[in-house]
Amino acid sequence: MDTVVSGIRSTGNLHLGNYFGAVKNFLKMQDKNNCYFFIADYHSLTTYPTPEDLHNNVKTVLAEYLATGLDPEKSTIFVQSDVREITELYLLLNMNAYLGELERTTSFKDKVRTQPKNVNAGLLTYPVLMAADILIHKAHKVPVGKDQEQNLEMARKFARRFNQMYKVDYFPEPKPYNFGAELVKVPGLDGAGKMGKTAGNGIYLTDDAKTIRKKVMKAVTDSGPTEMNSPLTEPVQNLLSLMKLVSEKETIDFFTEKYKSCEIRYGDMKKQLADDIIKFNAPIREKIIEISSDTDYLRKVAKFGAEKAKESASKTLKEVRGIIGFKQF
Ligand code: TRP
């Protein structure tokens, strides 16, 4: 069975794009692999959250992932900072990570450009910490989106370098977990591009009915088709793509037909889409609210996950220390 590691940014608030993208695939993965899912709270320190935010963000993320179906019995679900072994491996890997290659990563260069006043060493060594997350469990596979491919490439490089340096075949090279055709792209509500956090075009799993209605009714459309059977324009295609995720087939067929015959009324289509999203979200939203207020349960899950993660992490670290040559008198 393959070991899979995935870190979850601890910035909370899953939107439909996250749900139909990452989360659904996590749910499938956890049945077939030995999965470690963790909340990357050390990584979040590069942006200086307040102590309250740091904890609350972790709590939100944990509650949301549990509510959407990550299962602590099937997977190891833990908070990164509960497993200190990761930081020691991070220190060790840092010794073989070169300044030049770290400076050349796109994510670092982006940060230098966008936040020139806060170029901290944590940002520079972000890929090393990420490699430690992955290698500490000797992962075979890591599910990553496009934006994390380079970081994963670095992890592979660090694994290889360690093996070569000490002439061992210790770390497997973590490969990207490819979802292929299963990867659903969820469009945003602003007429172009995909749903994202920064774009402010997302519907969150915790949005209530009123918020969802408001957002969907404001979604960008166009002036409507003027010729029979004209191809779908992007904003309309986007609404239909969202419908495909949450609506009945008849609904989708109905509006597709109406578009073709130039009888479509975007207002009706949006109203229907809003209703269907609300129906889809409701049970998940309730679950998130329920779990968020159940501190005992969250504590239990985090503790159980940390214990399982530590078991694997301490074994790796002990072996790595031995390979490097740390010995007791
Ligand atoms: N950098 C990842 C992100 O921003 C989060 C992350 C941290 C991660 N450590 C990881 C992902 C290890 C996969 C494996 O999304």
Image: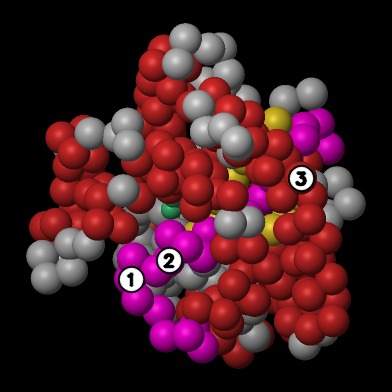
Q: Name the disc covering residue 311, or none.
A: 3
Q: Quadrant of residue 315?
A: top right
The residue under label 1 is which amino acid type? Thr
Residue designated by label 1:
47
Q: Are marks 1 and 2 in contact (CB under 8 Å)?
A: yes
For image coordinates 63% across by 56% down, the residue present is: 83
- Residue at x 62% of width, y 69% of height: 61
How far is disc 2 from disc 3 in space, using C-alphas?
24 Å
Is 43 a magenta residue?
yes
Q: Position of residue 7 (x, y in %)?
A: 56, 50
Residue 242 in the image, given as x and y percentages of width and height: 57, 57
Disc 1, SS = helix
Which secondary structure lies at badge 2? helix
Q: Which kind of residue does numbered mark 2 sit on?
A: Ser
* 106 and 232: which is toward the camera: 106
* Residue beneath disc 2: 44
- Closer to the N terminus: mark 1 or mark 3? 1
Dot 3 falls on a residue whose secondary structure is: helix
User: What's under tag 3, amino acid-wise?
Assistant: Glu
